[in-house]
Image: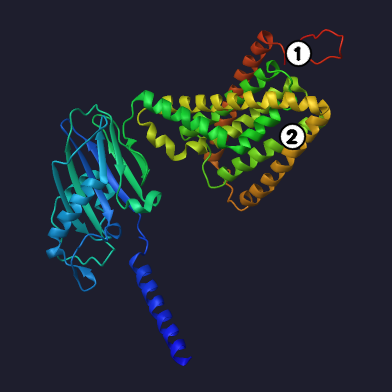
Amino acid sequence: MLRNRFKFTASLFLALVLASSLLAAHDLPTNLIMNAFVKIEPKQAHLVVRVPLDLLRGAPFPLKGSQYDLAASGPATQLALRALAEGFVILENGARLTPSDASGRLSPPSDRSFEDYDSALALAGRPPDLTTGIFYDLGYLDVHFTYPISSPKSVFKIQTQVAADLGSAIKLTVRYMPLGESSRAMLITGGSEPVALNPAWYHAAGGFVVLGIEHILSGIDHLLFLFCLVIPFRRLRGLISVITAFTLAHSVTLFASAFHLAPKGAWFPPFVETAIACSIVYMALENIVGADLRRRWLITGMFGLVHGFGFSYALGQSLQFAGSHLLVSLFSFNVGIEIGQLCVLAVMLPALALFRRLVPERMGVIILSATVAHTGWHWMTERWQVLRQAEWPRLDAAGLVSLARWAAVLLLAFGAARLLVKWLGRKFPPRVELPEGQMEQPERAA
């Protein structure tokens, strides 16, 4: 019995030692961000990239104690260069480019050369400073690849397959410098498809249309607001002015946010999210108490401004992939949102018509609106808890100027919306439900 217990204890000890060694050997890297420049010249493209040594543990860089032996690092650097030439994919018009020249060097974490392209390029071509000490896993490998290209006007794409087993945890920041144009930055995740550095306008447009459709179909709060809008309406004609007001309003704030005209500060995103939840609750309560549907376009437009800010957050990092086609991409994203809304309405309206056949109309409006109000109320209280912890801005001179600017924009937007709604009211007059046997008369346009 004692011998068996000893064997069990020894086996358990060996298993724990083996497990700890395996865990130590597979520690996740702590630095998962690579910084790169891509510069296009008339005959060639340059990729200058800084790769954390934490991501290159398979490269046999020699050590001298706890530091890298820089004098003997040449063979390992060449091996790493060949691996990185495979790991970074540069495409020209769909064809993969092969580097004609490659250079690299080890650099300490204190080096700041990658703050601009010229310094990074000069550093990557120099041999390492042998007087610098770089501790294991704490430095960088700075690399410069040169690719022959056919034309600087080609469509270039980039993809990273470095440390592919870590997937989207790997980030590659790219500062793209096209010939004769201003530079722009983008953030690319590992494991993603090749990303166009300078997409054609139709590629950018198609991608942002899809992005807009995906956002509206996955944004449950926007869908609930849209659902509240349509619950009381029995005909699509009555919805025309409401949907038009919502579209115009969210377009104004969406475009304003893209051009950095939205209010700044950590308070604003939670404020927008809370206001979106409030819009759902308000619209649901208005349905319950009975709303003047002829004036619904006005309140819809007010809340549409808030939802436009919410739509702008969906763009977030995605606008970096617009290339030089910012306006086209914004318009396409907006088109995608409208396509998604029309698809949702094509499902909602028949479903509501079927629901009215099963439940008395007024009771059905109350039941559906109360259910939505319940959900919106929970969102509102949860988001309010986040908002109340945010630091609110001080109303200084700059704040007053920004407030006056937005007041002018809102007045202009509401004036344009009112004119358009009046015109739509004359073209498509909404109709009122009358008791059976009476003829329907058009409502007076709002």
* Residue at image point 64% right, 38% down: 276
Q: Which residue is mark 1?
A: 431
Residue 210 in sight here: yes
Is 439 left, or right, of 111 in this rendering? right
* Chain-order first, disc 1 or disc 2: 2
* Residue at image point 53% right, 39% down: 263
Mark 2 packing: few (<14 Cα in 10 Å), some, or many (20+)?
many
Tell me if residue 192 comes above or below residue 348 in the rendering.
below
Quadrant (top left/top right/bottom left/bottom right) for the C terminus: top right
* Residue at image point 22% right, 42% down: 47
Q: Nearer the viewer, residue 339 or 355?
A: 355
User: Whole-percent x and y of residue 290?
Assistant: 81, 28
Q: Nearer the viewer, residue 55 or 248?
A: 55
Say whether marks 1 and 2 touch (CB < 8 Å): no
Q: Which residue is mark 2?
A: 284
Is 244 left, or right, of 292 in this rendering? left
Is 208 left, or right, of 247 in this rendering? left
Mark 1 packing: few (<14 Cα in 10 Å), some, or many (20+)?
some
Tell me if residue 427 comes above or below residue 115 in the rendering.
above
Q: Which numbered circle lies on residue 385?
A: none
Q: Nearer the viewer, residue 277 or 162?
A: 162
Residue 119 in sight here: no
Tell me if residue 238 comes above or below residue 366 in the rendering.
above
Tell me if residue 191 comes above or below residue 324 in the rendering.
below
Amino acid carrying label 2: it is: Ala
Regarding mark 1 in the picture, which secondary structure is present there? loop
Amino acid carrying label 1: it is: Arg
Q: CA distance from mark 1 to mark 2?
A: 22 Å
* Residue at image point 54% right, 30% down: 253
User: Whole-percent x and y of residue 113?
Assistant: 24, 52
Q: How is the image coloured?
A: rainbow
